[in-house]
Image: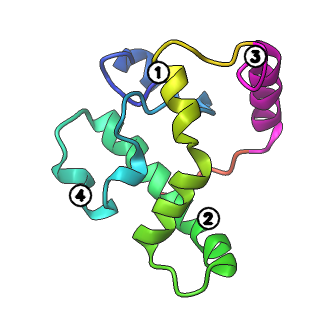
Amino acid sequence: MSASAVYTYKPAYKQFGSNVHIVHFLGETKPWSYQHSQIESLAGSELLHEHLHLWWSIFLDNVVDNIKDTAHDVSVPEAASAAASAIDDVARRSAQESGHPDFKGRDSFENISAHLDKILAIEVVTPKK
């Protein structure tokens, strides 16, 4: 599912949104590009705001401490940047976005399918609102 209302039909989301396990933040700007406190002032749909809040909640509750354990004295924005760097290999992303993914290697259907299967097999714990 996309975090953007442009691609998400709101009534369908209301009906089936609780079953969503993966949200794709389309475009260059990713959740870690924003400060958590900026979200409400951003232009965009309530679905985008909801997913940005959820991403930040998961990040702050489950990721920051792990990053801080490996890199002492790291602030939350620095931790977000470190997570972004670790997650996002710029050269690979650039190749993908320019229409040249590594179809026979890391970006093969089999690898992507196996990765999604692994992620979806994990029990997802939804943060309490």
Mark 1 or mark 4, earlier in chain: 4
Q: Residues within 10 Å of mark 1 (few under 14, many from 20)?
A: few
Q: Is residue 118 left or right of residue 29?
A: right
Assess whether mark 1 and mark 2 are in contact (beta carbons under 8 angstroms).
no
Look at mark 1 in the image and give the residue it sits on.
97
State the extent of the magenta-drawn residues as a range. 104-123
Look at mark 3 in the image and give the residue it sits on.
108
Indicate the position of residue 27 as horizontal and vertical percent values: 37, 29
Indicate the position of residue 127 as horizontal and vertical percent values: 56, 56
Which quarter of the figure has residue 92?
top right
Identify the mark at residue 38; answer none if there is no mark: 4
> Where 34 falls versus 79 (above or below)?
above
Look at mark 2 in the image and give the residue it sits on.
63
Assess whether mark 4 and mark 2 are in contact (beta carbons under 8 angstroms).
no
Which quarter of the figure has residue 9?
top left
Residue drawn where x is 39% and y is 18% of the image? 8
Mark 3 or mark 4: which is in front?
A: 3
Mark 2 or mark 1: which is in front?
A: 1
For mark 3, give the secondary structure.
loop
Measured Cα–Cα span from mark 3 to mark 1: 15 Å
Indicate the position of residue 126 as horizontal and vertical percent values: 60, 50
Measured Cα–Cα span from mark 2 to mark 4: 20 Å
For mark 1, give the secondary structure.
helix
Residue drawn where x is 16% and y is 51% of the image? 41
